[in-house]
Image (cartoon, grey):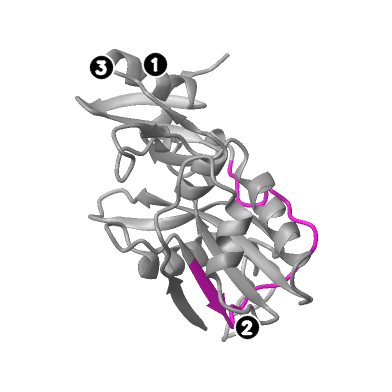
Amino acid sequence: MEVYPVRTRVFEEGEDLIAFVMAHIPKLKNGSILAVASKIVALSEGRVVVAEGTKAKERLIKSESEWSRKVLPRWWLTVRDGTVVVNAGIDESNAGGKLILLPKDPFASAARIRSSILQKIRIENLGVIITDSRIMPLRAGVVGVALGYAGFRGLRDYRGTKDLFGRPLEVTQTDIADSLATAATLVMGEGAECAPLAVIEGAPAAFSERVDRKELHIPMREDLYRSLFRNDRRKT
């Protein structure tokens, strides 16, 4: 598998995302997966606000979250789109003093980008991932996460198969979507790289026209970390 970043100029708020993508990506091979940073998707969708003061920002965090808990003076642990994220994913970096929210519906955004690209180039298999960054418990640094994706299956299920020694696998599944997002995020960078796109070639993914947007989700009551969500604050 090969993953390489696509460096671009700065993407402007309200700009045509598809035109921007097509102007910068190389000729895509059949079986390519295009990673698109959530920030430029959000900018294209007008998901930008100005919130002055701590209280205004906290109200915004709560309104953008399905679950929220304040854990440090400036930081909230929140759940949005089935993933745990800090401050509802609201981004202040490289934002010109504004706050950039996450895309409203990342799966719909990924499907729209994929469909638009396939109207312009003729390849059979193409995947698109909307990427963002996440922290992991007890680990420094961030890794990538797939907020939404299109064109391939996000989960590989080994349950019911056998391991090397013939032992039946009962719970093993591989999160393909987030693994690919992490690979892309690594080369796209988190600072001033100006590489909001990445191309993945040779990925061990099963391409599919239909995507189950719930395949990676685990209900809170069934999650191994469910004790962390006790005494939570949820929307009613």
Start-end of magenta stretch: 198-218
- The residue identified by callout 2 is 166
Position above or below: 160 against 89: below
In this view of the protein, which residue sits in the foreground, 147 or 224? 147
- The residue identified by callout 3 is 53
Q: Position of residue 179 (x, y in %)?
A: 49, 65
Count the numbered circles shown: 3
Specify whether residue 232 is in view.
Answer: no
Q: Is residue 222 magenta?
A: no
Give the label, 3 or 1, closer to the camera. 3
Image position of 180 (left or right of 49): right
Main secondary structure type of the part rendered in magenta: loop
- Of the two numbered discs 3 and 1 on the same chain, state the one appearing first in sequence: 3
Give the label, 2 or 3, closer to the camera. 3
Residue at 35%, 24% in the rendered image: 69
Q: Position of residue 122 (x, y in %)?
A: 78, 76
Q: Are marks 3 and 1 in contact (CB under 8 Å)?
A: no
Q: Position of residue 146 (x, y in %)?
A: 53, 54
Task: Give the CA distance from mark 3 to mark 1.
Answer: 10 Å
Q: Which mark is residue 59?
A: 1
Q: Is residue 201 magenta?
A: yes
Residue at 67%, 51% in the rendered image: 215
